[in-house]
Image (cartoon, rainbow, N blue to C red):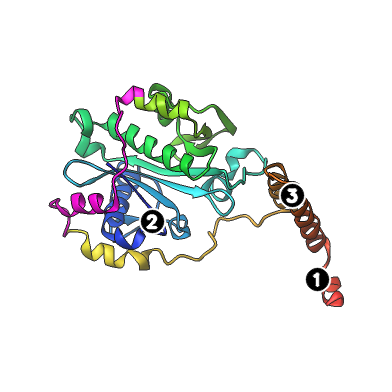
Amino acid sequence: MIIVIDALNRHLFSDVLAEMHALRARVFAGRLGWEVDVKNGMEIDQFDALNPAHVVCLDDDGDVVGCMRLLQTTGPHMLADVFYNILDGEPPLRSARIWEATRFCVDTEKLKGTTKNNSISYVTSEVMIGAFEYAQQAGVLDAIAVIDPVMDRVMKRSRNAPYDYLGSAKQMGKVKAMAALMDCSDERIDGIRDFAGITQNVFASNEDALALFNSGVHAHTHQTAGIALESAYDFDPQPTEMRKPTLDDLRLYCEDQIASAHTAADKAAAHALKLELSGLLTTTPAARRCDA
């Protein structure tokens, strides 16, 4: 069962989010040994404070057993601001129709040895289907993700192979990291569904997801964590690792807006924005004071 938690319904799911962040801490800090921030047993970073969409999988017991984070690329995101070395000096992709998928994980300890709807491969596929279908409904065309070779093989095996890669693979700690591109197409979604044997709608309503979660034995264990979750999101609004945008970044953003314009008026407005930004950024502060 998949529930997507975003800025619109986050107030309903603070306890679910707390369990999701606890799963991320167990996987990323515990099992994988990544250097991530863990607060009160929850792995949370500055990008969680930017109102991303969290794709969360609940198993038959109501436990959080899988998750993924989706974030627009028009603002700060991990490939642009943390893993930018992968890009070999090329500017990051920025478009309202390209989202970044990060923090994917499943609870392999609980799912180990289980079958059918609670197996690792089933939950992995269900999270992927939920992410791609949700993004597709939002008008997203492509997703980018920083993955390692193990995840790359998993995706290829599950009929979810990247169609391209950005930059080149770089050593990041104990593993190599690469930036993968996936299209949010019917063909990709159908392939994952066929691989996992998933034919039904994977999404749950808010009411059904809450009822299932609250029926589980874990329901009371994360209530205090859920209450404290908002303060854990209290990050500097700009990631400390973030590069300042360059003229090239802004030029590419404007050109993307021009290319995606549907009408002559939209295209003219995008051209005007490009000219205005170029003028502002190439004018010295002293000159701007004189103009004022």
Place of residue 153 in the rendered image (x, y in percent of width and height, measured from the top left): 42, 25
Q: Residue at x 29, y 32 (%)?
A: 200
Secondary structure of the residue carrying numbered label 2? loop
Occupied quadrant, residue 157 = top left
Q: Residue at x 32, y 35 (%)?
A: 126
How busy is the neighbourhood of tag 2: few (under 14 within 10 Å), some, or many (20 plus)? many
Q: Quadrant of the C terminus?
A: bottom right
Q: Residue at x 53, y 41 (%)?
A: 140
Against 53, residue 31 (above or below) is above
Tag 3 near tag 1, CB within 8 Å: no
Residue stretch rendered in magenta on the structure: 194-220
Place of residue 78 in the rendered image (x, y in percent of width and height, measured from the top left): 52, 48
Q: Which residue is mark 3?
A: 251
- Residue 212 sits inside the magenta stretch: yes
Tag 2 near tag 3, CB within 8 Å: no
- 191 vs 248, left or right, is left
Q: Nearer the viewer, residue 291 or 286?
A: 291
Against 183, residue 64 (above or below) is below
Q: Which amino acid is tagged 3? A: Arg
Against 266, residue 31 (above or below) is above
Q: Which amino acid is tagged 1? A: Pro
Occupied quadrant, residue 220 = bottom left
Occupied quadrant, residue 272 = bottom right
How busy is the neighbourhood of tag 1: few (under 14 within 10 Å), some, or many (20 plus)? few
Q: Which residue is mark 2?
A: 44
Secondary structure of the residue carrying numbered label 1? helix
